[in-house]
Image (tube, rainbow, N blue to C red):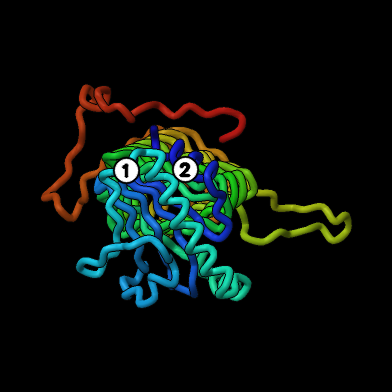
């Protein structure tokens, strides 16, 4: 039986009213109860240790455990409180877990749940670390490796999903998601950023993509942002499918600045301070010049620059080596150019001329 099935079994025994739950891999289920702001009481069923654990997230001692959970004798050892399940059947384990949850909820009810709910309103929207697979009672789901560094998510709503490749090497990223959003992070990236998703929006970051400093990203109003493979972002870049606030025509009342998709092809270099807004579509192999503002479609293998951005040069390709680390970068022979994957002739159409 998988963890989600166990959750359904527990709900069949007793439906918790005051808690949220999380699943860690196929190992543990955590039920979290909010006693006060940043004061979270946890009941955990761990199938590897074959125990029920209870504790405060902040590791403070539970001085009144017998009042919170009467008639179940938990063992205290090195600051942890647990009940050994090794001699119990699966059904007995689930019943005891449900009973533990019920006792905690009765304690909260006697304490005054309305007060607790008000105290915790801000905390439930706070950032949580991404430390592996995760699911909660609002159907927010994360599929991710456990070795990420300084990656956090803030779920403001429900039905969101984050999928991070096991070999992503993701570091220093903060995600913010409302309702029905999805983020897909592929492998071998060195990308940092503050990534914010609005309602029913989608974001994808391709394999091998890098950034010199954190990229600020917003994807709103059911739009999508797709960043291709092997893209390179410089410093102080922003990507926004929206303009943050609506603008209207005073004569008609019609909105003027609807959010639009952004599509960045493979092997695109986004220069220092460049900003991409809704409607930007950049073809493979292109370069966006420093401080450019891009809002429309441009073809492959071209240089784009200016405010607003314009096509400056066609039929170009670029390489990743940092010139500061090179003695001298010379020319390529035409036969060598023909072997370059992203060295293609620019193909224009009516949308990107």
Q: Position of residue 6 (x, y in %)?
A: 43, 40
- Which quarter of the figure has residue 335? top left
Res 177 seen here: yes
**Is residue 321 left or right of 261 when viewed as pictured?**
left
Marks 1, 2: nearer the viewer: 1
* Residue nearest the observer in this picture, 99 or 270: 99
Q: Secondary structure at mark 2?
A: helix
* Residue nearest the observer in this picture, 149 or 48: 48
Circle 1 packing at 10 Å, graded few (<14), some (14-19), many (20+), is few
User: Could you give the CA–CA distance between mark 1 and mark 2, rounded to whole angstroms?
Assistant: 18 Å
- The vertical placement of 226 against 322, above or below, is above
Residue at image position (48%, 62%) is 103
**Is residue 275 left or right of 187 when viewed as pictured?**
right
**Is residue 244 left or right of 342 when viewed as pictured?**
right
Q: Mark 1 near mark 2, Cβ–Cβ under 8 Å?
A: no
- The vertical placement of 350 against 268, above or below, is above
* Residue nearest the observer in this picture, 335 or 11: 11
Q: Pick whichever of labels 1 and 2 is earlier in the sequence.
A: 2
Instruction: Name the residue beneath numbered marker 2.
Output: 7
Circle 2 packing at 10 Å, graded few (<14), some (14-19), many (20+), is some
Res 286 seen here: no
Residue at image position (44%, 58%) is 194
Q: Position of residue 222 (x, y in %)?
A: 63, 44
Q: Quick one: quadrant of the C terminus?
A: top right
Q: Position of residue 215 (x, y in %)?
A: 41, 56
Q: Position of residue 185 (x, y in %)?
A: 39, 42
Instruction: Name the residue beneath numbered marker 1.
Output: 88
């Amino acid at each position: 039986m998988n963890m989600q099935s166990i959750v359904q079994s527990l709900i069949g025994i007793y439906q918790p009213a005051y808690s949220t739950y999380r699943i860690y891999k196929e190992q543990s289920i955590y039920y979290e109860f909010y006693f006060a702001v940043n004061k979270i009481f946890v009941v955990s069923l761990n199938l590897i240790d074959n125990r029920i654990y209870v504790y405060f997230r902040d590791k403070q001692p539970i001085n009144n455990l017998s009042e919170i959970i009467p008639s179940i004798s938990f063992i205290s050892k090195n600051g942890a409180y647990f009940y050994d399940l090794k001699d119990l059947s699966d059904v007995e384990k689930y019943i005891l877990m449900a009973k533990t949850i019920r006792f905690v909820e009765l304690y909260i009810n006697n304490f005054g749940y309305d007060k607790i709910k008000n105290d915790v309103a801000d905390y439930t929207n706070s950032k949580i670390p991404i430390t592996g697979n995760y699911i909660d009672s609002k159907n927010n789901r994360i599929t991710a490796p456990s070795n990420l560094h300084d990656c956090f998510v803030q779920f403001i709503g429900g039905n969101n999903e984050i999928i991070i490749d096991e070999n992503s090497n993701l570091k220093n990223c903060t995600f913010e998601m409302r309702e029905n959003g999805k983020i897909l992070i592929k492998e071998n990236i060195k990308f940092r950023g503050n990534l914010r998703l609005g309602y029913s929006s989608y974001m994808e970051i391709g394999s091998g993509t890098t950034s010199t400093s954190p990229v600020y990203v917003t994807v709103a109003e059911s739009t999508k942002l797709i960043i291709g493979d092997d893209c390179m972002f410089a410093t102080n870049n922003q990507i926004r499918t929206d303009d943050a606030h609506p603008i209207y025509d005073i004569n008609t009342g019609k909105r003027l600045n609807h959010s639009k998709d952004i599509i960045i092809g493979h092997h695109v270099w986004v220069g220092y301070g460049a900003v991409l807004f809704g409607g930007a579509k950049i073809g493979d192999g292109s370069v966006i010049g420093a401080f450019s503002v891009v809002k429309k479609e441009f073809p492959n293998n071209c240089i784009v620059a200016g405010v607003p951005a314009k096509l400056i040069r066609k039929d170009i390709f670029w390489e990743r080596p940092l010139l500061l680390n090179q003695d001298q970068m010379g020319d390529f022979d035409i036969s060598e150019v023909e072997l370059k994957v992203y060295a293609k002739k620019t193909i224009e159409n009516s949308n990107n001329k």
